[in-house]
Amino acid sequence: MQTSCLPAPAPHRFVHPSVESKAKRLVDILGALVGLVITAAIAIPIAIAIQLDNPGPIFFSQMRCGLNGREFRMWKFRSMVVGADKLKHQVENQAKGLIFKNEDDPRQTRVGRLLRRTSLDELPQFWNVLKGDMSLVGTRPPTPDEVSRYEQHHRQRLSVKPGLTGVWQASGRSAIKDFEEIVTMDLLYQQKWSIGYDLYLIFKTVGAVLASKGAC
């Protein structure tokens, strides 16, 4: 049963046009299918590398908050040691505000650093996109703990589906460590949204990934 990270929405709540766009959903489905084919093609080598480096689960899953605060389970290839969540309190947060970042997180494995630098760890999220929990382009999906500390203006981020990429990722995610700046980018995305803008951000993200720009 799906639960919500936020209180029940008020009646007649504004629905962002991207949420009801059939064209955006079609792009998501087509993109997810292509992404899952790529994921399947390289999953075995990645799985072997993960096991040789740090034996344990191949995948990592975590509850995140999506559209209107609805919780869903997000998937990644595991890039950290087993039990990394229990060690989080030992790692310095280099970001400002309601986001956690550390460019040299000691919990990362050697293979995990490579996966993150190339964004290969995020390929399983194409499954989330196909299911409809996420979109190819949107806002960064926050954790329930982060959302529990949101102020009112932060909640507008959840008016669109979370994205595999977005303005923040396409702009070089490691260089941006201020949560309020990320919120500003997310709200600007909602204002500028169009199918053309989504496609622009997808291609910009591909370029950033190939150049390893902003990876951590």
Image (cartoon, grey):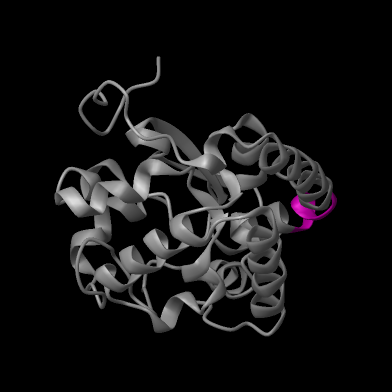
- Taking the spot 60% from the left edge, 69% from the top edge, the residue there is 111
Q: Is residue 109 visible?
A: no
Magenta stretch: includes residue 44: yes
Rendered location of residue 183, percent (x, y): 32, 63
How many labels sit on residues?
Answer: 0
Q: In which quarter of the image is the N terminus?
A: top left
Rendered location of residue 70, percent (x, y): 37, 30
User: Of helix, strand and loop, which mostly describes the magenta segment?
Assistant: helix
In the rendered view, would you say 132 is above or below 91? Answer: above
Left/right placement of residue 103 relative to residue 26 reads left
| Of 61 and 204, the residue lying toward us | 204
- Taking the spot 59% from the left edge, 64% from the top edge, the residue there is 53
| Of 100 and 86, the residue lying toward us | 100
Q: Quadrant of residue 69?
A: top left
| Of 23 and 108, the residue lying toward us | 23
Magenta stretch: includes residue 114: no
Residue at the top extreme? Answer: 1
Left/right placement of residue 16 relative to residue 24 reads left
In the rendered view, would you say 29 is above or below 140? Answer: above
Rendered location of residue 65, percent (x, y): 36, 39
- Taking the spot 27% from the left edge, 26% from the top edge, the residue there is 9
Q: Can residue 97 be seen in this view?
A: yes
Left/right placement of residue 92 relative to residue 206 reads left
- Taking the spot 59% from the left edge, 45% from the top edge, the residue there is 135
The span picked out in magenta is 41-45
